[in-house]
Image (cartoon, grey):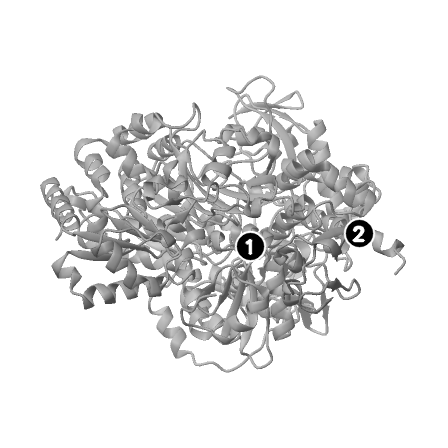
Amino acid sequence: MIEQTCVDLAKAMDILGRYPAEEPSLIQVLQDVQRAYNYLPCDVLVKVADALGVPLAHVFSVSTFYKAFALNPQGDTIVKVCTGTACHIRGAGQLVEELERTLGIKPDQTTEDLKFTVKTVNCVGACAMAPVMIVGEKYWGNAKAARVGKYLGKGSGNDEN
Amino acid sequence: MRIESRADFEALQEQARQSAGSHGQQILVCCGTGCLASGSKQVAETFAREVAKRGLDASVGTFVKTTGCHGFCERGPLVALLPSGVLYTKVKPANVEKIIEKTVLGGEVIPSLTYKNPADGERIAAYAEIPFYKHQLRVAMRNIGRIDPTNILDAIAEGAYAGLAKALFEMTPEQVIEEVAVSGQRGRGGAGFNTSRKWRSCRRAPGERRFVLCNGDEGDPGAFKDRSIMEGDPHSVLEGMVIGAWAVGAHEGYIYVRDEYPLAVVHLTIALEQARSHGLLGANIMGTGFDFDVRISRGGGAFVCGESSALMRSLEGKIGEPRAKYVHSTEKGLFDLPTVLNNVETWAGIGAIIDRGGRWFAAMGTERSKGTKAFSLVGKVKNTGLIELPMGTTLRTIIFDIGGGILNDRPFKAVQTGGPSGGCVPEALLDLPVDYERLTEAGSMMGSGGMIVMDDRTCMVDVARYFLKFLTEESCGKCVPCREGLQQLLHIFDRLVEGRGRPDDLQIIERLSHGMQLGSLCELGKSAPNPVLSTLRYFRSEYEAHIHHKACPAGICRELTAYEIVPELCDGCHACFKACPVDAITGTVKELHLIHHDACISCGACFDVCPTAAIRTFPKVELKTEVV
Amino acid sequence: MPTLTVNGKKVTVGNDAVILDAARAAGVHVPTLCQFDGLEPWGGCRLCVVDMWQQGWDADWFKMVTACNHPVADGMRVVTASERVVETRRVVLDLLLARCPETPLIQRLAAEHGIAATSYEPNPTPTDCILCGLCTRVCDHIGVSAIASVNRGWGREIAPPFHEAPPDCIGCLACAEVCPTRCIPYSEGAGKRRIWDKDFEMLCDPVTGEAVITKAQAEHFAGRSGVPQGYFATSDTSKRRVMAATFSKLTVVK
């Protein structure tokens, strides 16, 4: 379900100030909101609807249609496993399973301590490095299930696989 | 410097070329997403540091440049050296000093860093001699890997915007459309619709306001050519769009970039700013009085938004729901106004077509598929990466000559082309010349250019199920055949891969597939059955094995497959033990190892690492009949 | 004014007509689910598909299109029950029957097309909602947009924002009434109406005392039209009495 928490609306007002107050701005605004808050808080969506002149029902509809958006707070680190075709045949499934064994969560779930969210994502376009796992901003190509622990431990930095 | 005339542009070209030519040595480090994932950023930084430290930039005119994707991602990080033309592969920061000492300063090649041809073990130092590059003919990707995408002058030195200058100063909009018609260029996003026809239709549509759009929503899993173009040569896209806008009379444009391509957004943004400041975009382009500007719009993560009408709805801030095509978007598209939407690769080719002439482009390719096409060659192939070839090149050339053959020399089984809308082409058709018509006849399609090579360890039922799973999550849900049909097909395939297939399943699958092809609203639904139908066409026996014998011939479907170690071949190396994620293997080093069936999850990790091929698969049903 | 044939029968219809209009004019029945006169056609259910030929095409080349939104053209030939059209309708209804196995309308339509039971896996949580979109489309049309489609693909559903009582809903019941399977519940009584988990105060006719309209709806209409709210809070019976009284006072001038 959707959790309600008090959020600081200042960031949202700042974002809204950057775009024309009309419907075509909606998706760009929501992406900035997603990045700023790590999810789409209800209060912010109400503000967005009002500011852009879009019915709240449509804002909610768009928020649930596109995969880029989350309606619940995400973990500090998002772990993405690419499930593109090349990654699939080179073992992406094994990576997802290993993540489940290590973190105890399935894709689209967040650990209790809010540290990690696991997501499966569509092809990230690094198919030659299949299978690909992205921890935070760091891409791990030719990822191996046995090394998942290492990938999670090192969230950033340019070390090799 | 703002270009206000053709003379200004030519002066800038000259200045850019001189600057580019002034470098004694150039060290080109690939920083496309693939090489970045292998650590190329550190390699580039190390080069820059070492060159500066030795004062080589001043003394020998050595210049370190980060470029877009060279395409040979399997061998990254890639470093190319000019003017020698040497290519180094899998370069690490630790190799940098040696490269500078021996090659840059000493003119010697370091064999261990060069490409090793798997066919004969030979080392090839020259970029142009490596089979992967030798067969290529780069048009859309002409400058990628040569230029720094964040430096417009670099692009101009290599010919960027020359086509635009010709269009604006020597041609009328109608003549531009005619030139594109002569080229025979067809859309490179998948539909393959004739570009000039689309432009002509938009030009003739009534109304003042119209748009040109770039579809950068490359959603086919396995395709990354658009990403590489947007990241590695954004100016090729911009130039094409300005020419297109000139041709159809548009003053506004959008580039719709997939949410999953952040680097592309960064490089496109830089390119837009630089183009504007040089008068190549925005008001009064090159002093001609023609205004045209572009905005970048990020997708929200929806494959269906690659469909043109859904993309336009997304630009309007709505959900990505396609609509019926009875009213063409060239007449009523974005905001119900005349719109031209073309793919990234399509736009990237336009500048070259105008600059070198439509006839030049039409001289390449086949009768109905002119020019060149970018392909991403991935999967179980040795040389994975991005290539561009004339249309009509055969699959065999692509996979074996350029791709170097199948990974680990396993048998070739099929190549999947066209993404979730395409199909699998089997060995018997390897001599198929690749073009729009031939691929469609074979039951597949060109699509975005993704080519996923599969070996004998690929289950075709699992492949079909994979695409169905993908599409069930991407269907917008508007129309019954797609929304409900995909779900029902997936239910059937879930049963098939788990050994719960029923005798009439194939008949139901075929009937539903045809119903979806006929009844769906958009191409997502209409083409969704293609992977199913094409695997049924060429690999029916695999389906029958799943249904009637509860067996997976490829040894992939976990519920149907058991693994065991063949005693005579096991040398006790312990690799399988280490690879097993559930500790189902017992054994000590140098002793025979054993897989415990009750714990084994049939993931195949042990099979993949065994150096002596001592692990075999067999149908799980045989387990129950064994006496243990 | 284009002239075309539907199953061989010639009809002439208006310039802006769609194939469905032509079929009706020709007395030919084409089944629909997501179509509703007065609302923009949507083309989502795919039940109204027909085969159509246009001038300039090869003699045997027909295209399958939805009748509800495809424009007519002079000389067009429409076939409403070709083999592939009928087969497509069957697949659509078979799929809907799997989704909505307990819904009378779907059971009836499926039976009319020769489908007694679904060929597919029945929905483990049967629903009456066929996702025709009529409810959201009529709500948008009225200018309220209180509900919308949520999620995509098979998980798609119709819901108010955050699955809570929709702030914009005016309780007009248009969604409930346009729904082909009557799957939007509402209740009324004691001067109140409840729909989408939202309670509405009803305005009552000053004379008859009957509950006429929700306060929210009266405000919405008054706001859009400039007509005083009181007009909307008058029951039809009272309106008729007022009109009758007015007419009775008129004198006819010969």
Nearer to us in this view, B278 or B616: B616
What is the number of the mark on residue B250? none
> Given the image, what chain letter belongs to the residue carrying mark 1?
A
Please state which of residues B23 and C96 is positioned toward the viewer in this rendering.
B23
**Viewer-side residue, A160 vs B336:** A160
Residue A93 lies left or right of residue B623; in this view the side is: left
Q: Position of residue B188 (x, y in %)?
A: 43, 38
- Tell me what residue is drawn at x 40 percent, y 55 percent: B76
In this view, the mark in front (2 or 1):
1
| Residue tagged 2 | C101
Tell me which residue sits at (33%, 59%) in the image: B266
Left or right of residue C93, residue B294 in this image: left
* Screen quadrant of the C terminus of chain B: bottom right
Instruction: Pinpoint residue B120: horizontal percent, then vertical percent.
Output: 46, 41
B616 or B590, which lies in front?
B590
Q: Amino acid at mark 2?
A: Pro
Kindly identify which residue carries mark 1: A87
Identify which residue is drawn at 12% across, 40% down: B6
Residue B15 in sight here: yes
Q: Secondary structure at mark 2?
A: loop
Q: Is residue B339 visible?
A: no
Q: Quadrant of residue B194?
A: top left
Mark 2 and mark 1: Cα distance apart in space: 38 Å
Task: Give amino acid for label 1.
Answer: Cys
> Looking at the image, is C184 positioned above or below residue A16?
above
Structural crowding at the residue carrying mark 2, measured as other residues with C-alpha within 10 Å and reported as few (<14), some (14–19) or many (≥20): many
Circle 2 marks a residue in which chain?
Answer: C
Residue C95: percent from the left, percent from the top? 73, 46
Q: Label 1, secondary structure: give it.
A: helix
In the rendered view, would you say A17 is above or below B84? below
Crowd rating for badge 1 (residues with CA inside 10 Å; few <14, some 14–19, many 20+): many
